[in-house]
Image: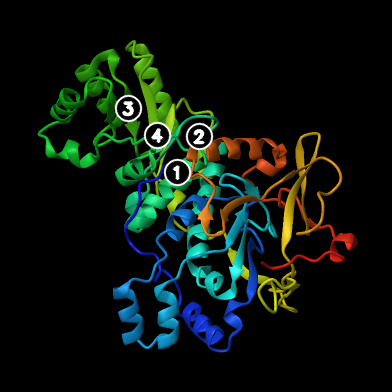
Amino acid sequence: MAMPDPLSTALLTDRYELTMLDAALRDGRGLRPAVFEVFARRLPPGRRYGVLAGTGRILEALARFRFDADILDWLDDASVVSTATLEWLASYRFTGSIHGYPEGEVYVPGSPVLTVHGSFAEAVVLETLVLSVLNHDSAVAAAAARMVAASGGRPLFEFGGRRAHERAAVAAARAAYLAGFAGTSNLEAGRRYGIPTFGTSAHAFTLLHDSEQDAFAAQVAALGAGTTLLVDTYDTEEGLRTALRVAGTELGAVRIDSGDLGSEAVRARKLLDEAGATETRVVLSGDLDEYRLEELRDAPADAFGVGTSVVTGSGAPTAGFVYKLVARADAPGGICHPVAKRGGEKATRGGRKTAWRRLTSGNAVAEVLRPFTASAPAGDVRPLQLPLVVDGEPVAADDLEEGRARLRRSLDELDDDARAITDGPVAFPTVFDDDPEARKHPEACA
């Protein structure tokens, strides 16, 4: 279970969320029941599927979405909203419901990965926070999943914290672990989420000492022969020989962070084996991404360290999620009327929807969307949305291990082409399966 963060999340938002709220409360329509959906219009270039991550962090952030006295005073001083709205915000608590795909689920364009149901006022103010979390975490998870696929089953360690904002680095480590990384170098991610942490030394430690042998001896004295020695500070082959002289054949691992990594791994493995250090692992790092990992598939490496490409826009472009109003009622308890933006590439499909994954011989072939009151579509399908929050109370656990297992199951439903890291079509299409019978029994917005 995640460790709590005491900071309020209420101002992790855009000003227009609160000005919309102010105007909607002023004219009386802010209390209309409303349904918002989160979905991606498209995937980033080259991606065939997305990986949902961040719902656990949303539940964590929702509990801290509170407007305390300091926040209210600042909003008042900045003239963001009226006095009446400040009074409304002072007692803000989300009392609605949230359904969504659980973490680790694969998604495609059009997948309603999150559905927020409550009054317009209490749901609209969550837009920026929800999108910030899902867009960041899902982007990292999708990039990490591709790297896991390219690594050929060998462990990956997330080393990207120094390339990201300090708080984003913690979230990125969580998302990478969800996607199958073995652990992280980030200690706060280890403390908060129970993720295994890894790391021994950098080149600076070697340069601190009068010789490479002195540096290795100091590290082995502190951490034992099972440690990982960084051998490429000066000359990699000589570094390997020095590491063996210091630690012997009980040496846990050597890390190589520069040069032609494929060739260096071959040379390292040969030298280690000739010395009898057959159990010593070879770890490669240094500007790795899924394409470089694919090139290293046949290299005799036992594990990889990945940094920049998994936590930044170069490897993890935004997931592109949007948060759109799809239904509203005229008054509490009234019928949910579909609403939608018309025209242009940003047109939306109105109405609250349920989502199902259609399978053929165990392979995912379509994302099937139906009106909320419709029954399950015919054929071999499985439901995708689960209750996350009911009447304002979280009902889903933040379980990273279950998310990791879920992603493995979801990826197993994709065929080989869909799992490929090369450019190609989306893994499977999204189709809307209308149900005329369901339209005769429209949903009542509670």
Q: State yes or no: discs 1 and 2 in contact (Cβ < 8 Å).
A: yes
Q: Residue at x 87, y 59 (%)?
A: 435
- Cα separation between marks 1 and 3: 17 Å
If you read the primary sequence from the N terminus, does the residue marked by circle 3 or circle 2 appear first? 3
If you read the primary sequence from the N terminus, does the residue marked by circle 2 or circle 4 appear first? 4
**Residue density around tag 3, few if under 14, some if 14–19, many if 20 or more, within 10 Å:** many
Query: In this figure, which residue is indicated by the disc labeled 2?
Result: 296
Dot label at residue 284: 4
Q: How is the image coloured?
A: rainbow
Query: Given the image, on which type of amino acid does mark 4 rest?
Result: Leu
Q: Is residue 396 visible?
A: yes
- Cα separation between marks 1 and 2: 10 Å
Q: State yes or no: discs 1 and 4 in contact (Cβ < 8 Å).
A: yes
- Cα separation between marks 2 and 4: 10 Å
Q: Position of residue 203 (x, y in %)?
A: 23, 40
Please, what secondary structure does the residue beneath circle 3 have? Answer: strand
Dot label at residue 173: none
The furthest residue to the left = 210
Please, what secondary structure does the residue beneath circle 2 have? Answer: loop
Query: In this figure, which residue is indicated by the disc labeled 3?
Result: 254
Please, what secondary structure does the residue beneath circle 1 have? Answer: loop
Query: Given the image, on which type of amino acid does mark 2 rest?
Result: Leu
